Amino acid sequence: MFEIKNLKASLADEDKQILKGMNLKIGAGEVHAIMGPNGSGKSTMSYVASGKGGYVVDEGEVLLDGANLLDMEPDERAAAGLFLAFQYPVEIPGVGNMTFLRTAVNAQRKMRGEDELNAAQFLKIVREKAKALKIDADMLKRPVNVGFSGGEKKRNEILQMAMLEPKVCILDETDSGLDVDAMKLVAEGVNALRDGKRSFLVITHYQRLLDHIVPDVVHIMADGKIIKSGGPELALEVENNGYEGLMNEVV
Amino acid sequence: MGEVKRENLAEALLARHSAPRSGAGWALSARRAARDRVLALGAAGRRDEYWRYTNPAALNGAEAPDVEVLQLDETPVFDGVEKLLITFVDGVYRPDLSDDLQGENLEIMTLEEALEVDIHWASDLFGVFEARGQNPVPRPFAALNTAMAGQGVVIRANGKVTKPVALRYCRENRQSDVLLHHVIRVESGAELTVLENGAGGARLNTVMEVDVADGGSFHHLRAQGRDHTRLAITHIFARLGAEARFKSFTLTVNGQLTRNEVVLDIDGDDTKASVAGACLGDGDFLHDDTIFVTHDARDCESRQVFKKVLKNGATGVFQGKILVKADAQKTDGYQISQGLLLDDDSNFLAKPELEIYADDVACSHGSTCGAVDENSLFYLMSRGVPRKQAQNMMILAFLDEAIAEIENEELAEDIRTRLSGWAERHSA
């Protein structure tokens, strides 16, 4: 389904390798979590997988259903089924949220050779999904993320995820900056998309999110690699003892 | 350029056009005075403070350039709007291609006719606003226009005019050197919308003198055609009375050289004015907005919003000034000019100026210049929007603040469609 194989990547501007041979395999319908100290390469992994500029891949592959995403443009990766929920969703003044969503949905459908949704079809679906995430009509009309609170931005990410129906979702610290209620709402949105086929990779610093989005596997990342994998209990261990002990144990 | 040569050039400017021979006494003397102004001011030169970024040589040249007449099969801008259509072909009024010159609350005639008779309100404006606009910044091409132009329209709105007056500028001749002069008076409480559309000539020089009386409202929307190597120098001289409304928006795509000058005098209290423009240039393209807004009354608001998208060596120029006189307390002046450079070869040159003598005012100005934001582009692409389409979305988003200045949503939507068409045609 989704596999990262021996991924090594560096910052383009500096001669500094961030990912140092990362391996990860997620089966269909599985939820994996990645935890790790600051600077361990979690966000870099999500950017490299989705094709953000500024990184150089030194070695390795990122496979989705057997196709190497690293050979594709970011929009092609999205059409292939990858979705990244941003840690800091970008504000785009002047582009209406609704226009943006419809353009994205139809661009992906077009790339996959499917019929585009007309305005009425699109509106019906988006209203339904927005309602579940408590996103009102006003938020849909406003420019993308402009003037949105932290919670609204994250809910907007989940709405995009729901509309685009990807195969693999990477959530990059989706819980950061959220209060408890907002986090629950976001988690409910994510859980609603768990259908036994769609896979999730949840990047987080805190065990708390994993109470709501329960993972099948938890990975600990440090210095550009996965250093330990286990069940949900691994997250509790981190919460109680920090990363220090785990890292020593492995080394 | 030496002084002698400059004067010779001014004479040459006058010599290249033939002034209408007849006219009422007032018209003849207005033209004579304008002719003297051209000679006194001399031709525009690179050393002039307001011509430093834009080379006037092609505008000063003896002949208009040879410009291919663009044949388009697309619907003309503003076509869907109900309007009073007045057509000029290569600068000549064409009654056969125009509606009858009449309308509710409207007095309208050609400049040719008006200058033959005694119309006191027109004689109070013709060449008068232009002459006043020469100080402190000389505008020799405007004086040339008053001295030599024989074509244009004279419009007086006496109440709410529901149908816009649409001036369509067509081209048939590859080398037409066109002068058009319009005189507009919006009476107290009256409303008028004027649309202009088309390149008009291989070299086009327009002057529009507009007097908006107390409580009057004037909207102006202009699209300057799509012909590639044409030259244009345009001028708006407007005076606004108390509680007046003035809005002008210009869309420019293509054209080798465009200089749009706007001189606004805000004379009455509680008046609101907006001058805006969106331009898109690819390649051999220079677009210059030179704006001068004078606040001489209390509690007035003025806005200047200019956005330029530039690629393949295109140049954008903005020279915008707000002058707030000592008695213009509580003035709210806003000015923004921004360039979006789609590559490293393009330029945006901005000179914002504020000159404020009143002590209780709020004036802001901002000018920025940059490339399409990579983070935003990646965000759009990560959702599946292809690069070109994402970039075009960013271009339209960038221009939107200027388009938002357009009052009429239907006309604004027409402009958005044109911009998006251009962006698609030019996305590489």
Image (cartoon, rainbow, N blue to C red):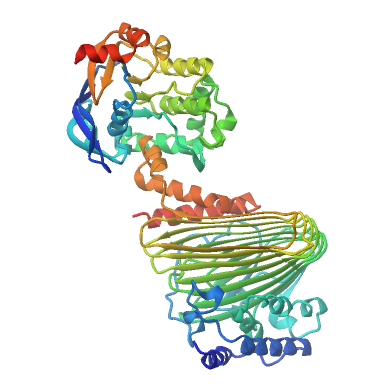
Q: Residue furthest top?
A: A233
On the image, the x and y values in percent for residue B373 come to 41, 46
On the image, the x and y values in percent for residue B351 come to 54, 64
On the image, the x and y values in percent for residue B109 come to 73, 75
- In the image shown, does A135 or A218 lie closer to the viewer? A218
B276 vs A132: above or below:
below
- For the question of whether residue B17 can be seen, the reply is no
Residue at point 36%, 62% (across, down): B345
Looking at the rendering, which quadrant does residue B358 occupy?
A: bottom right
B326 vs A79: above or below:
below
**Left or right, A219 with reference to B324:** left
Looking at the rendering, which quadrant does residue B11 occupy?
A: bottom right
On the image, the x and y values in percent for residue B347 come to 42, 63
B194 vs B68: above or below:
above
**Left or right, B411 with reference to A184:** right
B113 vs A239: above or below:
below
**Number of disc labels:** 0
Residue at point 45%, 36% (across, down): A90
Image quadrant in which the C terminus of chain B is located: bottom left
- In the image shown, does B224 or B139 lie closer to the viewer? B139
- For the question of whether residue A200 can be seen, the reply is yes
- In the image shown, does A72 or B344 lie closer to the viewer? B344
- In the image shown, does B350 or B289 lie closer to the viewer? B350
